[in-house]
Amino acid sequence: MAPEPPTNIEGARQGGADERPFKVLLVDDEVAILESLELTLSEDYTVFAVDNGRDGVQILREEDIDLVIVDQVMPEMSGTEFLEKVIEHRPAAVRMMLTGYADINSIVRAINDGRIYRYIQKPWEPDELRLDVKRALENYRLNAENTELAAALAVANEKLRAENLFLRREVERQYSFDQIIGSSQAMQRVFDVMEKVAQTDATVLLSGETGTGKDMVARAVHYAGQRKDARFVAQNCGALPDTLLESELFGHKRGAFTGAHQDKKGLFEIADGGTIFLDEIGETEPGMQVRLLRVLQDGEIRPLGSSDSRKVDVRIIAATNKDLRAEVKEGRFREDLFYRLRVVELEIPPLRERREDIPTLAHHFLDITNEKMNRKLHGFTNAAMDRLTAHGWSGNVRELENEIQRAVALAGDEETISEVMLSEELRRAAPAASGEGISMPDERDLNLAVDILKRRMIEQAIEETGSKTRAAERLGIPRQSLQKMMKRLDMD
Ligand SMILES: Nc1ncnc2c1ncn2[C@@H]1O[C@H](COP(=O)(O)OP(=O)(O)OP(=O)(O)O)[C@@H](O)[C@H]1O
Ligand SMILES: [Mg+2]
């Protein structure tokens, strides 16, 4: 009925019924009555007065009538019949009926049916009628406003729900398995375990050096499983002193310690139904280890300063870059907790043990960085890629990501990332290039293979020496030959 739902609540108020005078339609076959009604109401409203039902219907069609007063007894179309037309054309309009005698039964029936708002008994008192009409129209305006507001609210709610769903899907996409790069066997094994474990509630212990992707894997496992619509929360257990960590994880009652001004929910409660990621679990103190053990055993938490425990349903994924077994042996980590955590153990290998993933990862980060920094670098020179694959990457994937970001940020109008654009450390650490850094072409056709090799060697020599003259020197050919060769190989 509301034609165009307004886009916001402000919009719903504007153009409301209160901006224009209300339109009142009077229908009565007795002209004297018609005139006196008109006199009573025309000061406050726009009044249309007609002496028969047919003309009345015409006006209903043409005008936005807000209130109708009709005589009950008329020769052609009776008042009741006319009200049917009002309901048909202006269902929201207020309906009033004039009657010469009070037939209490028909009044009650009509009011109960919701067909009319009020009977006006002849003769009427003008002041009373004015007041009646005023009240009726006030009601009418409030109703109309409510309907508009409700429609606006429904639209706003729907929009919010859609946005919320969109954001959820966006987050799921961002943390989906296919954002994790790795075709090496080592990573394929990681994916296998992830896939299986995502469908369960089993506690997972992730281990791996810094920057290997533990965070990423934990999130992907959560968002691939049944718990994805509940929260994923992460806490670095090495970042806080014991009491603060306890209050973060388990919450506290007001007054539990100085500064605890009000009750606070812990992450375990916030993640109820979802997943909690306990990063750097190896950094926890003995007291915290006991409390974590209790959650794992009984699924119960107790807020600081509270005397009762609560049940929570939380999936735990823990991570460490320490060798937890060694920590257990040294007596720094509780053995029982270790076994509770490592129901499924997943070790993410360091990048140097899966070098075949480096080119794909490098291109992946190049794409992302291009997008972020609005650049259009195409790829890497062979020499640059050789350096990347040869590097030790003690900071693992994160270090590689940073390296690519740095190269893109510092690039001028280059189209590819070449060796000179890499950081000092990479250029220094890789094996000194004099042909060794160049890989054999895959090509079986001898001439083609030789061309590819020539192209790579020339490219590298120019890159490293910085000029064609010196490159020719290093390659042991005259400068002109180098130039001819480059032309034939379509280089430049
Ligand atoms: N296989 C991968 N594919 C794509 N990006 C990856 C991969 N592994 C790691 N990354 C990226 O590398 C960065 C570091 O990963 P992450 O934070 O998950 O490592 P971490 O193991 O948690 O490190 P830390 O132990 O230091 O906390 C992130 O930006 C992540 O997106
Ligand atoms: Mg991490």
Image (spheres, rainbow, N blue to C red):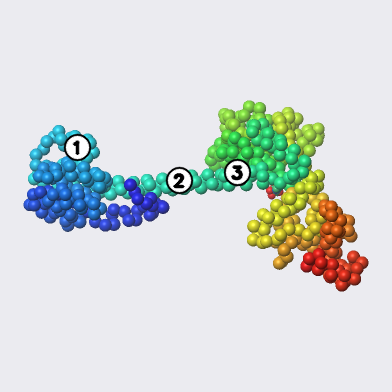
Q: Kindly identify the amino acid type of the residue bearing the numbered disc 3.
A: Glu
Side of 326 relative to 44 (left or right) = right
**Of the numbered discs in the image, which one, if any, rests on residue 158?**
2
Number of residues whose C-alpha sits closer than 10 Å to that of mark 3, classed few (under 14), some (14–19) or many (20 or more): some
The count of marks equals 3
Instruction: Indicate the position of residue 193 as horizontal and vertical percent values.
Output: 71, 35
Is the C terminus in the top left, top right, bottom left or bottom right quadrant? Answer: bottom right
Would residue 268 be seen by someone viewing this image from the given angle? Answer: no
Q: Identify which residue, 366 or 486, lies in the foreground.
A: 486
Q: Secondary structure at mark 3?
A: helix
Quote the CA–CA distance across marks 1 and 2: 38 Å
Q: Are marks 1 and 2 in contact (CB under 8 Å)?
A: no
Quote the CA–CA distance across marks 2 and 3: 21 Å
Number of residues whose C-alpha sits closer than 10 Å to that of mark 2, classed few (under 14), some (14–19) or many (20 or more): few
Q: Secondary structure at mark 2?
A: helix
Q: Identify which residue, 396 or 438, lies in the foreground.
A: 438
**Of the numbered discs in the image, which one, if any, rests on residue 110?**
1
Q: Kindly identify the amino acid type of the residue bearing the numbered disc 1.
A: Ala
Q: Kindly identify the amino acid type of the residue bearing the numbered disc 2.
A: Glu
Which residue does the numbered mark 3 point to in the structure image?
172
